[in-house]
Amino acid sequence: MDATGALSGRIDGGPALRLGRPEHLAAKARALGLVLAQVPAQDLSAATYIDLRVPQRPAIGGLAPLVSAEDEAAAAAAAATAQESIE
């Protein structure tokens, strides 16, 4: 527990857990169970944290962007070309 009263933890060999205040712990445990059951293992191993402070809306953070920089650059170039052809 930190100075603000928030709980945190870590999955062994995995991401940190952000639990927030020690309230609704059963709901937070259920949310964690759902995250662990539904999120692919490679995403869990790449995550830096699982935020369970609002158990109805768990969040996973620290994942790499879904779109690579090369894909972003190609999309921007295509958009610019399309814009030029419209003008």
Image (cartoon, helix red, strand yellow):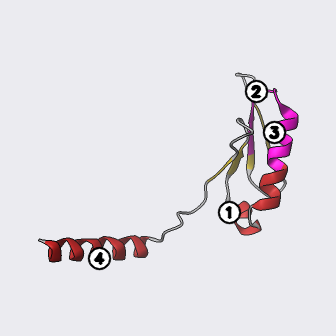
Query: Could you tell me which secondary element the residue under label 2 belongs to?
Result: loop
Toward which corner of the image does residue 30 lie, by quadrant? top right
Disc 3 target residue: 28
Please give left or right for residue 43 compared with residue 65 in the image.
right
Disc 4 target residue: 78
Query: Could you tell me which secondary element the residue under label 3 belongs to?
Result: helix
| Contact? badges 1 and 3 (CB < 8 Å) | no
Q: Residues within 10 Å of mark 2 (few under 14, many from 20)?
A: some
Query: Could you tell me which secondary element the residue under label 1 belongs to?
Result: helix
Q: Is residue 16 visible?
A: yes
- Total numbered labels: 4
Residue 66, numbered circle:
none
Toward which corner of the image does residue 42 lie, by quadrant? bottom right
Query: Quick check: 33 above or below 26?
Result: below
Disc 1 target residue: 46
- The CA distance from mark 1 to mark 4 is 31 Å
| Contact? badges 2 and 4 (CB < 8 Å) | no
Residue 21, numbered circle:
2
Q: Which residues are magenta?
A: 17-32
| Contact? badges 2 and 1 (CB < 8 Å) | no
Asked whether 14 or 26 is in front, the reply is 26
Mark 2 or mark 1, whichever is nearer to me: 2
Instruction: Please say whether residue 10 is one of the residues in the magenta stretch.
Output: no
Q: Name the residue rendered at 83%, 37% in the picture.
A: 27
